[in-house]
Amino acid sequence: MIRNSASEMASKLASGEISSVALTQAHLDQISAVDADVHAFLHVDTEGALAQAAAVDAKRASGEKLSPLAGVPLALKDVMVQKGIPTTCGSKILEGWRPPYDSTVVVNLKKNGIVILGKTNMDEFAMGSSTENSAYGPTHNPWDLTRIPGGSGGGSAASLAAFQAPLAIGTDTGGSIRQPAAVTGTVGVKPTYGGVSRYGLVAFSSSLDQAGPCARTVLDAALLHEAIAGHDPKDSTSINAPVPAVVAAAKAGNVKGMKIGVVKELNGDGYQKGVRDRFEESLELLAAAGAEIVEVSAPNFEYALAAYYLIAPSECSSNLARFDAMRYGLRVGDNDGASAESVMNLTREVGFGREVKRRIILGTYALSSGYYDAYYGSAQKVRTLITQDFNKAFEKADVLVSPTCPTTAFKIGEKADDPLAMYLNDIATIPVNMAGIGGMSLPSGLAEEDGLPVGFQIMSPVMKDDRMYSVGAALEAALLSKWGAPLLSNIPALAGSK
Amino acid sequence: MSLTYDDVIAKYEPVLGLEVHVELNTQSKMFCGCSTIFGAEPNTQTCPVCLALPGALPTVNEKAIESTIKIGLALNCSIAPFSRFARKNYFYPDMPKNFQISQYDEPICVNGFVDVEIETDEGPKSFRIEVERVHMEEDTGKSLHVGGATGRIHGAEYSLLDYNRAGIPLVEIVTKIVPGTGKYAPEVARAYVAELRDILRSLGVSDVKMEQGSLRCDANVSLRLIGAQTLGTRSETKNVNSLRSVERAIRGEMIRHAERLNNGERVVQETRHFQEDTGLTRSGRSKEQAEDYRYFPEPDLVPVAPDAAWIEELRAALPERPSIHRKRLQELWSVPDKEMSAMINADVLDVVEATVALGADPAKARSWWLGEISRIANEKDVAIKDLDITASDVAEIVALVNAGELTDKLARQVVEGVIAGEGKPAAVIAARGIKVVNDDSALMAAIEQACAAQPETAQKVRDGHVPAAGALIGAIMKETKGQADAARVRELLLGHLGQA
């Protein structure tokens, strides 16, 4: 039952074949069985999830009309605030904090009857590409427990690959939904910036952060996308326009006549051979399905990573200033006579991990008077240039594509001491955030040299998110008929797994 | 050894710069829906947004933008077609986000001016104060330092935080440097703040209560030798909580600066705190090393781009400028300068105007508000406007006096009753049984009784010694408990004694 897609679960729930309580319990059992190995979850809300499931079952029994995903369980990234449920963002500084309010995404999930199983592990404050920066220990990739599950949303992606949840919520600032999806053989979508409300998403970099759906199929991602998206007056940057018709696009999966642009700069040197091979194969399948493949160039992408590592740290240095021990979270050194200033300093010293401190220092420096123009100012100009590159490319193509990341999952600890090598993982995903457009990663197979999943990235213009679902669904169908079974059916069995 | 003000201005020219913070009177805060009512229990007017809980986001209060644009228009500013909020980053426990949302290099209103008129040795003279910018920001919370001797953070045992004020909309109005005021610098500054206060009040955008902090002035002062081109080092005096203090603080700083300069010392660039009791300032935070606030555009808010047609609508609806309005009223009412100033200083001009609008004679309205009502306010040591009496009460009382239903003396009793909370004038009159005795037969009875009681006095009057009637009138008024019309009593009495 837990190996079904969310839409299959939804039909079984609708037909009465299974109950939401049974489905939820099955996932809770799987979490109990395998999470000691995977460590995808930071908090499991057993009682809350079963209560939500029972409520959905009761509504269904009373004949109430329910939304498509009602009763289907979901894993929530721990950066998303849920009333009464511990929210740590993978940081010690928020240990024990229980939010007094629901994020808009959670409000929407609850409205749709989606059952929230618990909170998933992540790099501290979403800063990282491996989940190794979690203060609560790393998450392990279900394909190979010695490897990273990507990051920052490694917990959400791993929970899907380990069949602990059929759906998950991620957030993507530079690739934190798409890169974990790629290395775990799952689907992850970063919607257009402003497509999903950020209210209640604990901010890392406000102008880049975007919540989105994680799932095992393109259609499941679309169903979840539709459930959480839409205008929210509580988020000034939320777009006031109808949600793109992503479910319809995913159901049709039609690429006939579509122009698909291959971004020259996001391929080649630095990309693992198995990654490139799978990418080429996918392009052939799309061409066979009726799409026209063209090449586009985005010369300014070269500067994207450098600019990103000025903008994101700058915003984070300011966003994370609120963690000061005054109102919530950790408080260290509050002894008789200690000044507020020393308590703030000690708490931040003890409460934040190395990567978070590194970025706060970077950002503080970049915003300093005398350096602002050279660093933050120049980075904003690069951002404009990247957007212009995308605009030009979208004149030639309906969507753009690339490998999601240069390599398959690396070993835990392999890059932990080399931040630059770690940052390079996001080279293909970052431009999407810089321009605020939509991006999706879906599995394109296993790399021959290591047998690990490879991700295929699709990028679509602002508020044309439906296009990446059309292409994603078409490619998924073509790959499925080639493989005969979903990629995840190849995943090694975990100890205790059913 | 201490310099006189005359010594200072003989040698130096003061240069001013004024920053005024105004709390807007919007119902809700700048970036969330919390109430802004003053004086609530600590931390009861807070929410995830103004407490800066993780994940919460600000949204802009449209009304605050409207108020700010109105202020800009009233101060002759250009309204930027596109302006942005910025984050001003620094750590302080009463600032929940540890940054303040403000505006930096893209303020909403720029380049305005205010003309003020003051009395000089050569008669009234007008000065133009140029306004550099008007921008929006949010207020911080309040810290209460407990256990120390001074109420300051140093030496305190602990501090309490109240976030009710965090996020209250503030507008900051910053002047360009103001040279050329010479010895009138303190008066010009006072007149500027007074004019700003009047303008803001006429716009209805703020309570403008300096004593409650809804209008706060920071005064920057520097001196340079007369004729010099370069500016001297400035000090910035904060906590200036009344118009009088603006004047005193600037005068005091001018003397302090001059003393230092004369002694060959330098003026330290710093903030100073004005002390109401001594009229002196005390040293605060040094600004010698410019604090780095790491301003950058607020990514959680979209830029403010007000519609041009909306701005024109707001411009068209601006009220008459208070200074022009005052001149017009003065002419209309034919009030001498001195009395006009008295009304302005007592802050009763608008209520007098309202009383007149309800039909009262301007002279009568003025005399009630400046006279009896002002006396009671002084006695109770409260502001006139805080008394429980309205323009319509006064207009009603004036009308009753005109109709002969009340004497002036009785009217004072009614005013007193209204202020004491006994109700509207009619209710006070009914409850206290106040009425003019204008029944001649009742009066005649009292007259006969008085004449019988004082036969010798009555005889004097009969003999033509009319001034003696005063004693009889007094007795009659006493008998009728002051409710008789004294003129009518006199008329009847003299008739009765054959002296009509």
Image (cartoon, rainbow, N blue to C red):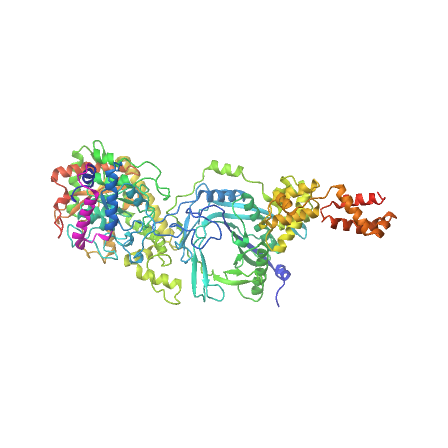
Image coordinates of residue B47 in percent, x first then y, are: 39, 50
Please say if B12 is above or below A260. Answer: below
Report the number of numbered marks: 0
> How would you classify the magenta stretch by its main secondary structure?
helix
Residue at the top extreme, as displayed: A257
Give the answer, above or below, for where B359 lies relative to B104: above
As rendered, which of A470 and A314 lies closer to the eye?
A470
Residue B481 lies in the magenta-colored region: no
Report if residue A260 is visible in the image. no
Magenta stretch encompasses residue A42: yes
Q: Which residues are magenta?
A: A15-44
| Residue B309 vs residue A323, the one in the foreground | A323
Q: Is B366 on the left or on the right of B66, as rendered?
A: right
Q: Is residue A274 left or right of residue B274?
A: left
Residue B188 image point, x, y percent: 60, 52
Picture coordinates of residue A317, whole percent (x, y): 35, 54
Give the quadrant of the N terminus of chain A.
top left
Q: Position of residue B60 (x, y in %)?
A: 42, 45
Can residue B199 be seen in this snapshot? yes
Determine which quarter of the picture holds residue B489.
top right
Tell which residue pokes out farthest to the right in this image: B463
Q: Nearer the viewer, residue B424 or B399?
A: B424
- Asked if residue B270 lies left or right of residue A228, the reply is right
Front residue of A260 and B345: B345
Vertical position of residue B312 compared to residue B149: above or below: above
